[in-house]
Amino acid sequence: MFDKKTINIPLSIATHAECFNCTTRLIDDIKRLKGVQTVEVANEPCRLDITYDPNFTSLESIESYIIRQGLRIKSHYDHRHYIIEHLDCPDCALKLEQRISKIEGVTWASLNFATSTIWFEYEPDVTPLETILSCITNAGYRYIEPAIAQVKHEPTVSVFKLEGLDCPECAVKLRNRLAQCEGIEHVEVNFPAAKLTVRHDLSVINRSDILRVVSEAGYSALVQTSEDKSAARGFFHIANQRLVLTVVSAVFIFCGFFISLLNFSIPVLSYRLSSFSLV
């Protein structure tokens, strides 16, 4: 007669419940235990259905064994996930995923292009985490831990007036140089207007830092603040008001002059008509 019980997966494994490999490893270990007949994943999350022979083993022994094996698996495998920045296309995501999967000690890697998130499992005893992260940066991308990404500040848009920009190629080089700076999300260089627009995280890189990068590239820039824009709008607003007043005044003057001419012409015309009738 066999007993069937539903047992919780240890917290050491449950924290990585999305890793099917860890659950499979745990199930394989439990099946090797004498007296255990079947082990299956239960309908409830993070739980296992176990059928065992109470004549050979007890429920307490099984639970104790599961905890030990869970700790062993946790110490042998580590799981990480990061947000990948500057991921432009699905092919780029696939290439980066394959590149990380080939690292010795990495058992699996999965990169979701839609969420720009990479998940991977690795053996810390075989390869350090720094080796995997260096693979990401060497491929031209940046990684952010999810906890940091959640508290990331809202980006700020800054506009600069550029000087010394001689050709479109120079504009492209400046844009690429700024795009590589940490904290900058988007760069747009308008060569005809000599204008630089940058969307950036002020907590990482401020306007002074951007001006320094522009200066190191051999150009100069001036920050176009909101006050400058308001002042410009105010100037044109005042100029427009003056123009309207001038036009209105001119219309009134013209109307007055026309009326005065009309009043002067009526008696003259009447006199000429009366003179004609007398003749």
Image (cartoon, rainbow, N blue to C red):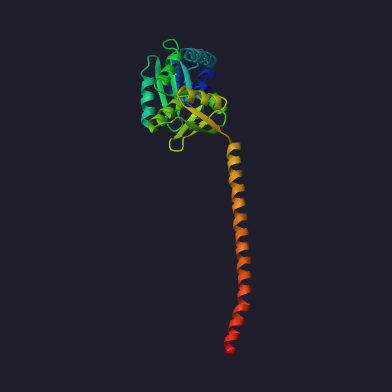
Which image quarter: residue 19? top left
- Residue 208: percent from the left, percent from the top? 55, 25
Name the side, left or right, on which 160 lies relative to 171: right
Count of numbered marks: 0
Please say whether residue 267 is visible from this viewpoint: yes
- Residue 111: percent from the left, percent from the top? 42, 27
Quadrant occupied by the C terminus: bottom right
Please say whether residue 17 is visible from this viewpoint: no
Instruction: Judge by depth and name the residue closer to the eye, 100 or 264.
Output: 264
Residue lying farthest to the top in this orientation: 125
Name the side, left or right, on which 14 lies relative to 244: left
Relative vertical location of residue 139 with respect to residue 239 in this rendering, above or below = above
- Residue 203: percent from the left, percent from the top? 57, 25
**Which residue does the image show at 45% across and 21% down from the upper left?**
23
Relative vertical location of residue 182 with respect to residue 279 in this rendering, above or below = above
Instruction: Judge by depth and name the residue closer to the eye, 98 or 174.
Output: 174
**Which residue does the image show at 60% across and 40% down from the upper left?**
231
Instruction: Judge by depth and name the residue closer to the eye, 134 or 197.
Output: 197
Residue lying farthest to the front in this orientation: 279
Instruction: Judge by depth and name the residue closer to the eye, 144 or 192.
Output: 192
- Residue 31: percent from the left, percent from the top? 43, 17
Which image quarter: residue 234? top right
Relative vertical location of residue 74 with respect to residue 259 in this rendering, above or below = above
